Image (cartoon, rainbow, N blue to C red):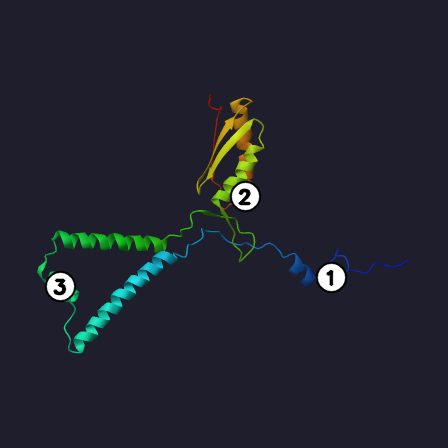
């Protein structure tokens, strides 16, 4: 008769083979709060490249003209014309007001691009692991929910759209009562939305109708 040996300091009781606690912790880490999952930010490569090219061209042209004037040459015609217009036109001139309005609109547009996330087609998912973020494309989410809706008895076709705040299903029902199909669709799609694991679950809207008579 042999006595059962107790777990040592580096072993976890109940672990087959007496694996060290450090190995077990590495395989199955304790759950850690991953923090909130916000929207994904767009790189804005095209607007940034356009702004950079415009600024680079304007700055290079101005520096070349200034260097040419310093070397004893005459300033370019566009700079002389610009200096004359700035010296003679009043602030209430339509051209001055129009240029200022255009510059203001452009500046506001650039600020909006800089301060907003973008990537509206990507829905952020709940974070379960620190350092890892996941997102789901809205068309992919709509396709998954559409397949779930097609499994409901009586549904002939479904048109599914998924937005950031609202998921809308428009189904054509060729048999069964509309109220019964609507209830089954609401349950199936609600369960599907929960299983998507989105950070902010969209509100569900279900519409059912009969096929159009030919």
Q: Residue drawn at (31%, 63%), measured in percent from left and top?
A: 53
**Mark 2 secondary-structure assignment:** helix
Q: Nearer the viewer, mark 1 or mark 3?
A: 3
Of the 4 image quadrants, the one containing the N terminus is bottom right
Tell me how far mark 3 sits from mark 2, CA to CA.
62 Å
Query: Where is mark 3, residue-wise?
Result: 81
Crowd band around label 1 with a 10 angstrom C-alpha radius: few (<14), some (14–19), many (20+): some
On the rendered structure, is 88 left or right of 23? left
User: x and y percent of residue 18 in the render?
Assistant: 76, 61
Query: Where is mark 2, residue-wise?
Result: 196
On the rendered structure, is 42 left or right of 97? right
Above or below, comparing residue 112 to residue 74 in the picture: above
Task: Determine the image quadrant of residue 25.
Answer: bottom right
Mark nearer the N terminus (3 vs 2): 3
Count all numbered tags in the image, as a single digit.
3
**Mark 1 secondary-structure assignment:** loop
Q: Are marks 1 and 2 in contact (CB under 8 Å)?
A: no
Q: Residue drawn at (8%, 60%), measured in percent from left and top?
A: 88
**Mark 3 secondary-structure assignment:** helix
User: x and y percent of residue 56 in the render?
Assistant: 29, 66
User: x and y percent of residue 62 in the render?
Assistant: 22, 69
Tell me how far mark 1 sits from mark 2, CA to CA.
36 Å
Residue at the limit of the structure toward the right, as seen here: 1
Residue 19: give its label. 1
Q: Nearer the viewer, mark 1 or mark 2?
A: 2
Crowd band around label 2 with a 10 angstrom C-alpha radius: few (<14), some (14–19), many (20+): some
Please state which of residues 133 and 98 is positioned toward the viewer in this rendering: 98
């Amino acid at each position: 008769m042999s006595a059962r040996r107790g777990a040592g300091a580096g072993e976890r009781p109940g672990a087959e083979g007496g694996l060290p606690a450090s190995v077990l912790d590495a395989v199955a880490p304790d759950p850690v709060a991953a923090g909130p999952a916000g929207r994904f930010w767009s790189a804005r490569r095209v607007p940034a490249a356009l702004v950079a090219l415009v600024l680079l061209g304007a700055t290079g042209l101005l520096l070349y003209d200034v260097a040419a004037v310093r070397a004893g040459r005459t300033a370019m015609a566009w700079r002389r014309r610009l200096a004359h217009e700035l010296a003679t036109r009043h602030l209430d001139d339509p051209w001055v007001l129009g240029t200022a309005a255009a510059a203001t609109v452009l500046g506001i547009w650039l600020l909006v691009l800089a301060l907003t996330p973008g990537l509206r087609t990507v829905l952020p998912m709940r974070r379960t692991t620190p350092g890892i973020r996941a997102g789901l494309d809205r068309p992919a989410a709509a396709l998954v929910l559409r397949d779930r809706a097609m499994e409901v008895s009586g549904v002939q076709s479904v048109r599914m759209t998924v937005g950031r705040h609202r998921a809308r299903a428009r189904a054509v029902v060729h048999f069964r009562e509309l109220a019964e199909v609507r209830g089954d669709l609401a349950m199936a799609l609600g369960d599907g939305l929960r299983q998507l694991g989105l950070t902010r679950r969209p509100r569900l809207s279900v519409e059912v109708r009969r096929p159009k008579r030919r």
